[in-house]
Image (cartoon, coloured by chain):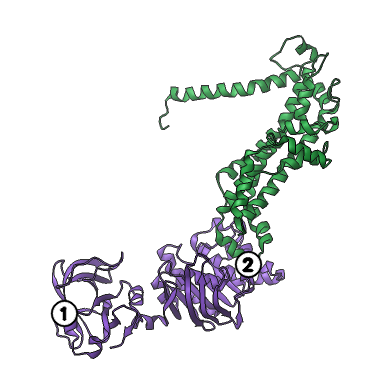
Chain colours: A purple, B green
Amino acid sequence: MANVTLRDVRKTYPSGFEAIKGIDFDVADGQFCVLVGPSGCGKSTLLRMVAGLETITGGEIDIGGRIVNQVEPAERDIAMVFQNYALYPHMSVYNNMAYGLRNRGMPKPEIDTRVQEAARILELGSMLERKPGQLSGGQRQRVAMGRAIVRQPKVFLFDEPLSNLDAKLRIAMRVEIRKLQRRLKTTSIYVTHDQLEAMTLADMLVVMNGGAVEQIGNPLEIYQKPATTFVASFIGAPPMNLMPLRSDEISAQLNGDGRVAGEAGLLGIRPEDFLISSEAVTGGIALELTVEAIERVGAETFIYGARKNSPQALAANPGELSPGDVIVRIPGVEAPAIGAKIRAIAPREKLHLFSADGRKRIDL
Amino acid sequence: MVEHRRFGNLLPHLVLLAGVAIVAFPVYLAITASTHDNSVIANGQMPLYPGSHGLDTYWQTIVSGTGRTTRQPVGSMMLNSLIMALGITAGKIAISIISAYAIVFFAFPFRMTAFWFIFITLMLPVEVRIFPTYKITSDLGMLDSYSGLILPLIASATATLLFRQFFMTVPKELVEASKIDGAGPIRFFWDTLLPLSVTNIAALFVILFIYGWNQYLWPLLITTRDDMQTVVIGIKKIIDVHDALTEWSVAMATAVLAMLPPVAVVVLMQRLFVKGLIETEK
């Protein structure tokens, strides 16, 4: 049981590339912290620095009150679950779990007790004599978890442990990991690029981008009040609609608000915060859209609309919406026809305002 | 080929059978020759059927050898060959697996330079560097000794390369998991890397044992005492007699005996050998 504290942690490679640009946060004892961000944002590197698999070139990492910068991985009292599980292929499931304990010189009966207990928790009892090659992906995943559990470490580290599983199993394992962590109350740091996994698992969410932290907080708080446009578009699927405030119909609707006229440059609205309606809105916003595409996924429907009078420009980055496009999410399967004109309204309390560069949130 | 025409199947089989005959006939001839009395072959007749002196000839060959040039029993030559071949094989595997381990898993200055230095020794087999090697061996007083037969031959760039290629396919997470599990470099080597390399070691064992067993030039050069002779040299010496009839039956028996250990190694290790060359257990 321990808390993990990072103080101005930095990683600069000999080539001069700065992978981690000064990160501070504190994971309280027993909390589940999730690091989330696009690939290449440094989240795995940061986790590996906590594990001791990468050197720390600046700052301090503190596990349970001890600064571990110069401590070997085995001495840090951590356990790690790898993306490809990294099970020893020539050892039985039992030995995979017992290996770390044996290396520590633990007496045999104690090892046996711990392995049997872990096998019971993870329902691996009947597979203890098998080799990893004879197990399915989900079972291997559980063995990797078992290897971490038997150590009874201060901290669990997970490096995208579910990304090698199929979608259905991933959801099941996600729930299992959460239950297990609640039960063992072990401080955990979990890396993922999947924002849904991040939202569902985390007590504390750290959104990273380009080697720096964008926002830290509780997942719902981050969802409801994203600090930057990066967080706004990364957390939530489909992403938040972002549109420039100036020089078109939007600014006219929000006129009379001093803050809007001042520093704000971008407006964000989550797809589900729209309502298709002809009602008048006071203080909120109404967009005239032409329906361009419809996606029905059963429980809900996504409408892709183009804004009236919007400049037809290409998206800034691949995968992003072009500036004039808006996604509206409505429940059920009833949707307007393609080419139809619709009016989407969003109330004032659902609007997010950001500075023009997207780095700063402005509260309405 | 998807088609199964009768003629289409027959032709390749005929070609293969002809190939087998070409390879197997001399072996058959050696076996038959070793079962006849010396005088039969000395007469210039080479029978194609087995004779009746087989057991006598082999007994004589193994226990006492020929009565002519070399009076060394082939049994002791076989032992010398075996010690040399096993020594070379074990030495080559041990050295190359350790070198490959260093090159792949440790970051040290001039790592690639070290690798290339090992690699270019492929261009310098014993035959090329035979004089300096002989000089060093003789200066160290290792002529006519097992260490002299074995040590100069145990560095192997090929084996190092093979192990290196295999080690590079070992996921780096396995190394990291070992680190977290508290296994240092030596533990990782013994507990994880070595068990994973078993099939590769077996494949190399076959190749290197045959290489060691077939050594001719080097043993010829550094062994002068009869009791240090290896069987491959023995065959040559048994044939090469002056002013007397070659004991062909003994020579043939020696040749047959010399073939047995490599054949045994291949047959016994075939399954592991093929596995080692085509797949890895990861």
* Quarter of the image with the N terminus of chain B in it: top left
Residue B8 is drawn in which quadrant? Answer: top left
Q: Looking at numbered disc 1 in the image, what kind of residue is underneath it?
A: Glu
Same chain for mark 2 and mark 1? The answer is no
Find residue A84 and name its label: none
- Residue nearest the observer in this picture, A180 or B225: B225
Q: Is residue B255 above or below residue A11?
A: above
Left or right of A277? Residue B131 is right
Left or right of B34? Residue A156 is left
Q: Looking at numbered disc 2 in the image, what kind of residue is underneath it?
A: Asp
Q: Residue at x 85, y 29 (%)?
A: B226
Percent x, y of residue A65: 60, 83
Q: Residue at x 73, y 41 (%)?
A: B88
Mark 1 closeness class: few <14, some 14–19, many ≥20 residues within 10 Å = some
The residue mark sitting in front, 2 or 1, is: 1
Query: Circle 1 sits in a helix, a strand or a loop, which is it?
Result: helix
Q: Is residue B98 visible?
A: yes
The chain identifier of the residue carrying mark 2 reads: B
Determine which residue is flagged by label 2: B181
Residue A323 is drawn in which quadrant? Answer: bottom left
Q: Do tag 2 and tag 1 residues touch (Cβ < 8 Å)?
A: no
Percent x, y of residue B176: 58, 64
Percent x, y of residue A180: 52, 75
Determine which residue is flagged by label 1: A249
Q: Residue at x 35, y 73 (%)?
A: A234
